[in-house]
Image: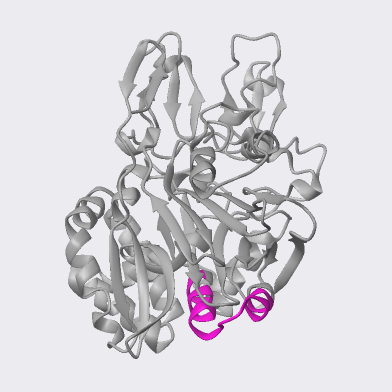
């Protein structure tokens, strides 16, 4: 049994848990496909709804769903059935179906001003001025495609997700059937009818993994809102589910994952029989693609390393701390391993070099061998987490995975005065006890800061406005 020591406290980590499995019959009317799933997970869903289903958030969800109108009939039917079984408003389930898209908005919010009216909806005070990604749950993730000695390809996947304490308890594996025959299998979260990880078997079958790819240019937020509220594009998780239902071979699946319209940016990691690729998606097509080819392995987390994206070194989810790259950690371990097995690859995915504090699901696939190994691993954040604004010690974890240094929390933990939640642009951040004034930039939601006398000679979160005249408006 693993032991994890945090500060001076040593705790015994629980062993990994099996992933609950269900059969989803596509011949059944959409309103009743998830009755068994919701029956299994409903207690956890009710606790989660009681904790986060506040009136302002439900009002925001209602406005969002009202403007979009109904989704395509099959998806709306599934949403309606989940709402009925959970007694959660249908508009809330519809809005949650876009959680993947909405969490790529890396901006602080106090109010949501709707583009079609003068009305606005306030964000609850305790969540205001947090980045969407850190407030409503950021998808992390690591994906590895690697050949073993005989050329067979394994696909390893870590799903990292904030609110791990709750969402790991809602994670399941669904086998989708039609006409009594298996069509595909996907990993899902109860109440969220979207595919996050999946496999379609067969002689030329394939696997699929979605990883967050954050917006990377000025105007990206505007494009996303346009896709969601003007064009009213379908959620990416539903697009991928339909691809897995309709497409039975690797080449056509890669083409579909590369070209079908999405609402937001993301990475699609796909493996097949002795082949694989990473597709960096923009909403209208592929930004770039990395094929396995003659390489032994390819790795992707959540950052465009091909463009030199330095944010991978400011990832707050790694147990090894700021400055560590999970991608490079995985590469180091893979380079030290001459031959890889499914069991060894699963162990590698749990290594501190690769895992995150909020890794809720792990799997290793091999299409050629028709094998799937999966588990719900122990994670630091799965045992309990603390809400925004709470002072935490070094052995405690924030639900958002983000925290900031403040002497206001010194009485709670003098050696680790941290408060849950990151600081929005425009906020003065407290100087760390270090000669290097740039230490602590990870306190800022944007991972950027600048020196200003207006902050008492310390630093303010956000870009220096004198260096860049381009400013993207908050939504």
Q: Quadrant of the C terminus?
A: bottom right
Query: Considering only vertical position in the picture, is 119 above or below 143?
Result: below
The residue segment tinted magenta is: 237-256
Residue 320 located within the stretch drawn in magenta: no
Quarter of the view holding residue 29: bottom left
Image quarter of residue 440: top right
On the image, the x and y values in percent for residue 268 come to: 62, 63
In the rendered image, is residue 245 in sight?
yes
Q: Measured from the top left, where is residue 107 in percent x and y?
A: 57, 49
Residue sitting at x 49%, y 42%: 129
Q: Which x, y percent locates residue 434?
A: 64, 10
Front-most of residues 255 and 406: 255
Residue found at x 30% / y 63%: 21
Q: Is residue 54 above or below residue 177?
A: above
For this orientation, the residue located farthest to the front is 150
188 relative to 1, above or below: below
- Relative to 454, say whether 19 is above or below: below
Residue at x 68%, y 39% (from the top left corner): 338
276 vs 367, left or right, is right
| Outermost right residue | 467
Q: Residue at x 82, y 38 (%)?
A: 467
Q: Report whether 1 appears left or right of 327.
A: left
Question: Could you tell me which quadrant the N terminus lies in?
Answer: top left
**Along the line of sight, the residue nearer the viewer: 148 or 39:** 148
């Amino acid at each position: 049994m693993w032991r994890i020591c945090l500060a001076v406290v040593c705790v015994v980590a629980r062993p990994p848990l099996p992933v609950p499995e269900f059969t989803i019959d596509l011949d059944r009317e959409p309103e009743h496909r998830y009755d068994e799933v919701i029956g299994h997970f409903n207690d956890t869903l009710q606790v989660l709804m009681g904790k986060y289903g506040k009136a302002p958030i439900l009002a925001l969800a209602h406005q969002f769903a009202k403007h979009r109108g109904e989704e395509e009939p099959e998806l709306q039917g599934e949403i309606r059935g989940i709402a009925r079984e959970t007694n959660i408003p249908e508009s809330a389930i519809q809005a949650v179906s876009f959680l993947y898209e909405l969490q790529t908005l890396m901006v602080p919010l106090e109010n949501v001003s709707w583009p079609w009216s003068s009305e606005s909806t306030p964000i609850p005070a305790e969540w205001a001025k947090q980045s969407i990604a850190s407030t409503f749950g950021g998808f992390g993730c690591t994906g590895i495609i690697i050949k073993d000695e005989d050329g067979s390809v394994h696909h390893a996947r870590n799903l990292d997700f904030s609110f791990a304490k709750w969402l790991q308890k809602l994670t399941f594996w669904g086998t989708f059937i039609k006409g009594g025959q298996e069509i595909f299998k996907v990993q899902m979260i109860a109440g969220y009818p979207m595919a996050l990880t999946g496999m379609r078997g067969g002689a030329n079958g394939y696997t699929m993994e979605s990883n967050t790819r954050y917006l990377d240019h000025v105007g990206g937020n505007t494009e996303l809102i346009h896709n969601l509220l003007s064009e009213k594009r379908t959620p990416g998780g539903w697009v991928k589910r339909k691809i897995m239902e309709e497409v039975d071979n690797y080449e056509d699946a890669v083409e579909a994952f590369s070209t079908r319209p999405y609402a937001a940016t993301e990475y699609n990691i796909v493996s097949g029989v002795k082949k694989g690729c990473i597709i960096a998606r923009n909403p209208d097509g592929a930004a770039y693609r990395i094929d396995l080819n003659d390489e032994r392995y390819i790795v992707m987390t959540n950052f465009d390393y091909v463009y030199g994206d330095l944010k991978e070194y400011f990832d707050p989810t790694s147990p090894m701390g700021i400055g560590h790259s999970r991608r490079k950690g995985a590469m180091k371990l893979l380079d030290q391993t001459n031959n890889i097995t499914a069991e060894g690859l699963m162990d590698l995915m749990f290594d501190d070099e690769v895992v995150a504090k909020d890794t809720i699901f792990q799997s290793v696939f091999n299409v050629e061998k028709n094998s799937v190994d999966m588990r719900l691993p122990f994670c630091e954040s799965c045992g309990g987490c603390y809400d925004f604004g709470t002072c935490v010690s070094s052995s405690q974890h924030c639900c958002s995975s983000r925290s900031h240094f403040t002497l206001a929390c010194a009485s709670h933990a003098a050696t680790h005065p941290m408060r849950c939640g990151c600081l929005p642009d425009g906020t003065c951040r407290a100087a760390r006890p270090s000669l290097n004034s740039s230490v602590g930039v990870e306190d800022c939601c944007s991972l950027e800061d600048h020196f200003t006398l207006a902050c008492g000679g310390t630093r303010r979160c956000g870009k220096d406005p004198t260096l860049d005249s381009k400013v993207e408006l908050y939504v």
